[in-house]
Structures are given as C-alpha cells and as structure tokens.
Image (spheres, rainbow, N blue to C red):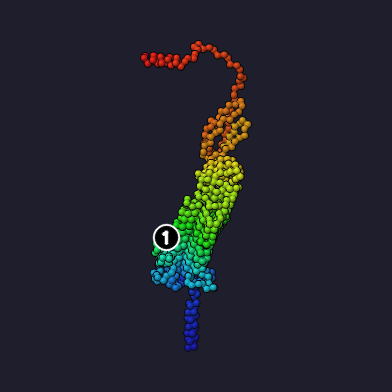
Amino acid sequence: MKRKILMLALLTAVFALLLCVGAAAADEYDLWVNGVQVTSDNAADVLGNADEGATVKYDAATNTLTLDGAELSVLHTYDNQYYGVILARTDDPLTVNVIGDSKITVGDPGENADSIRGVCGILHDETGFAPVNKTWSINLTGTATLDIEVNYFGSGIRAHEDVDIEKLTLNINVNKTDDITDEYGGGKFSEAIRANDTLTIENGATVNVNSVSGTGPIYSENGDLVINDATVNVTSLAGIELLDGSKLGANPIISYGDVIISGNSNVTAKGYLGICGNNIQISGNAVVDSTSTVDSAFWVPTGKMTITDNAQVTARGFIVGINSSGGVEITGGTLKACGETNYAIYSWEDLIIKNSIVEAMSDPEYYSIGATGAVDIDDSWVSSNNGAYDAAINNSVEITGSTGQAYGDVALPGDAIVPEGCVLVLNEGESLTIPEGVTLTNYGTIQVLGGSFTNNGTYIDYGKTIGEIKGSGSFPNNCFVTVKSGNGAVDVVYRVVKGEGFTLPEAPQNSGYIFLGWRSGDATYRAGESVDITSNATFTAVWGNLPDVKPSEPETPDTPVFPFYDVTARDWYTAWTWAYSLRTTR
C-alpha cells in the first residue's frame, strides 16, 4: 500500500512538472501591440479581454499582424528612447494586414521626455544597425483603412530599413509641431512615414497625409522613394521659425536617394518646400502636381529631372517651378510650370524638350525657360509668357505671349491650347498637323499665310481660323454652312463657330433670272443678312424668271397740257417769295 501511495505521489509530481514545463513553453515574440507582448498563447487574440473580439491576430510563420477594427494607443519601449504602439524587433520584415478599418493614436509617453527620440504608430526597431541575418522592415497591406494620428514627436510609420505600402487606404495626420533646440534646426521632429532605406507606395494604395511638422512627411533617408500605381496626397505647410529668426520648412516628399513616380500614379504634394530627390523620375501615365509656397516645386540638388512617356506634371513654385542641378529632360510628357518670382523651368546643365507639351509662366523679369547649358526644343509645343532663352527650336510650335510661330513641320505631340489673344501664324514652308487622337483647342487666332494646317484629329475652335484647313478630323465646336448658288457655280462650304453669326453672300448672277434671296428650310433671307448658326445648314439661292420682252423703239411722248419751262434762279426765287407772302397775309 505504501508503495502504491509513493508511486501515486511520484506520478503527481511528474504531472505537475510537465504542466509547469508546458506553461513555460509558450513562445514570446519580439513584438508588442498596444503594450501587450505577442506570444504563441495570445497570437489568435493578442489583446484578449482588452477589447471586444479578436481585433489583433498574429501569424508567426509569416510574421504577419492582422488588424480588424482595432483601436490602438498604448505605447511600449525597448530602450526608453523609441516607443511604438506597434513595436517590432522581429528578424524578418513585419507585415501589417488591415482587413477592417482600424486606428492608431500616438500620444505623449509621459516619462523620460528628455531622452525620448521618437514615438511611433508602427515601429520596426530603430536602435543601432540591423544584424546581417535581420531585416527590420515594414510591409503594410490590406483591404481596409488605417488611420494614424501623431500627437507627439515621432512618426506614424518608421522602419530601420524599408517601408512598403500597398493596396490599403492609409490616412496620417501629424498634429505635433517641432521643438527646435538650436540655430541649426536641431531638435525633435514629427513625420508621417520614414524609411531609413527604400520607401515604396504601390499596387493601388491610397496614402493621405496632412502634417504641421517642419520635416518631410514622407521621407526616405538613404534609399529611393518609389510610388507606382498608387495615389498619394500630401499637405505640409509648416514653416518653423528657428532661434536665429530664419524658417525651417518641409518638403512633402523627400528622398536622399531618387524619387521615382511611375505607372498609373496620382500624386499631389503641397508644402512649404517642394518634392525633392537626388534624381526625380516621372514616367508612365503618372499625374503629379507639386506646389511650394516659398521655394521650388521640384528641387533636384545633384541629379536630373526627367519626365517621360505620357506623364503629366504640374509644378507651381514661389521661386522656380523646376530647379535641377543635373539637367532637365522632358520627352513625351506634358508639363505646366510656374515660377512666381523667377524662371518657370531652370536647368544648371542642359534642358531638353522633345515630343512634349510644355506651358511655362515666369516672373516677367525672367525668361520662362532657361539653362546654364543648351536649350533644345524638338517636335514639341511650347507656350510661355516670356520665351525660352537662346533655344534651338526644330519642328515645333513656340508661343510667346500673344504671338506664335511654327518652326518647320509640326505634328502636334499631344493635346494643346492656343490661348485667348494669341495669333499663331503658319507661313510658307511651315505646317501644323493635328494627328488622330490628338486635340487642339483654339481660343485665339490661327492664320494660314502660305503654310499648311491639317486636322486629322480634333480641332475645337472657339476663336478664329483664317485660311484653309485640310484633313478628315472632327470640329466639335464648328458648324458647316453649304451655299448653293444654282447658277452652275460649285457649292461653297463655310466652317462657322457654333452660335456665331454667318453673313450670307451677296446676290449671285444668273442670266435670265432675278435673285429673290437665300432659302434655308422654310425661311428666306436677304443677301448680306447675318444668320445665327447653331447646327449644320444649307442655303440655296431662289431665282425668279425675268419676263420675255423684246426691246423696241420708245414712242414719242405727248406734249403736256401745261408744259414746264426752265426759269432762272432769280425768277424762281421771286415767284416763291410772292406766293409765301400771299399765304402769310391771309
């Protein structure tokens, strides 16, 4: 019996030990969410009773954190310097998958204020250098919306290496202004997204950022900043006053590598400064609009600015629209640039415009387009208020102010506009062709003086066109008026701006007939009459037969009963005054 009791006690102890070993066997991951460390035990519902439902889940196999309606705000720190509502030190890139609308609020940690270097919504370790076997990056994806509010110094999203954002909608508000501590701009700053290496926004992602900080809201410190097939809207209008009285402003999008925008991207950036990168490359069907309230809309400090393919770029700068140290190449794109107080486009090396549509508006004291090197314009349409400095122009149209000229044979490379008040003259040896699929809109005057004007695309004429237009294209704002004289002459077709008056021709000649007017439908109009034209119309001459009378000698007139005789002026005056005196005395 004693032996059985001893054996039972031994088994009980072993079982208890196994339970303890089992309890201690839970894996702890280098990942904290809302102040809770993620483990193998809580991975299916990280927050447990702290919220309703499993709003946060973790898959260790893929290092993926899933947010489904999560509301997160509790900070965690590993070293009392960097804090994160989501803080990762995992070996592999952390993927955050947002499948239900979620929100992260970044607030004041309330301790160690002097030693805090950054408080983040999502942080993949920022301390030291990542070992070779670790990749401290963040991949943000999903089908829902993630809102991040930054109310303290730090970042909405920050990674020691790369940040990749795709598919989801990300809204970040940076509500904390900077704390400048010296005249060099040192201090604590707030950003929306920061990657120490490459920052990529792609695959249908929509990113909206509004920042009051003096540092770049979207910032790549060492690698490239890539936007491909994504929508990005950034506003950063802060101007922080330094201790010496100068201002520190933010570039809404900035990279110490290259800024590369491609595909079907749509990017709008408005900031104290403009978009900045060592090289800026915009291509594909990208639409990019950058505005700087105090400087250049695009600033390229070392490399080149290139706009290619079908990219459409708008650059509004308080000083210069585009300012590039290493050259500007616009090949196959559309650019609207404005420099309020300087050039619209300036290159410190060569400036090349080829197969492109460019509109440049500058301070009247400066050329609109200029370069330290050569300015070459080929196969393009360039419109400006003050011209291009010392430009070589071939097979292109240049409009400067109210005058326009074609240089050689021009095939319009894209949709273009003749501005109101402008006269574009096509002289002998010059031609302008609107190709199929291209639209030219005229608010001014196009005058064909020995040259050639061909429309095989679309010509929308709100102004005036003097001379013949060849081609088989469409005229959406024109009506065609056909005049049929009916006297053997060829019918004449006039092109009239819709809604304007058409003056009918003078009466034609037709032997044996008398002209009675111009008939259109049930109405008949006089020669020279003006008729408002709102649709295509035909006017046909109406003729009446002259009487068939043979000429003959006129008969001798009868002598009147009271013949008239010529009298002198004096006799006529005397008779008139006598008759008048009789009338007044009665």
In the foreground, 105 or 386: 386
Kind of element beneath mark 1: strand
The mark total stands at 1
Q: Residue lying farthest left?
A: 585
Residue 569 position (above or below residue 459): above
Asked if residue 3 can be seen in this view, the reply is: yes
Q: Residue lying farthest top?
A: 561
- Residue drawn at the location 53% of the way across and 34% of the way down: 503
Q: Position of residue 475 (x, y in %)?
A: 56, 43
Pointer 1 local density, CA inside 10 Å: few below 14, some 14–19, many at least 20:
many
Q: Position of residue 61 (x, y in %)?
A: 54, 70
Q: Position of residue 188 (x, y in %)?
A: 42, 66
Tell me which amino acid carries mark 1.
Answer: Gly
Q: Position of residue 438 (x, y in %)?
A: 57, 48
Quadrant where the C terminus sits is top left
Name the residue that disc number 1 marks: 239
- Residue drawn at the location 58% of the way across and 28% of the way down: 543
- Residue drawn at the location 55% of the way across and 57% of the way down: 373
- Residue drawn at the location 53% of the way across and 12% of the way down: 559
Q: Residue lying farthest right?
A: 488
Q: Residue lying farthest bottom?
A: 2
Residue 6 position (above or below residue 102): below
Asked if residue 95 can be seen in this view, the reply is: no
Relative horizontal placement of residue 307, taking residue 182 as reference (left or right): right
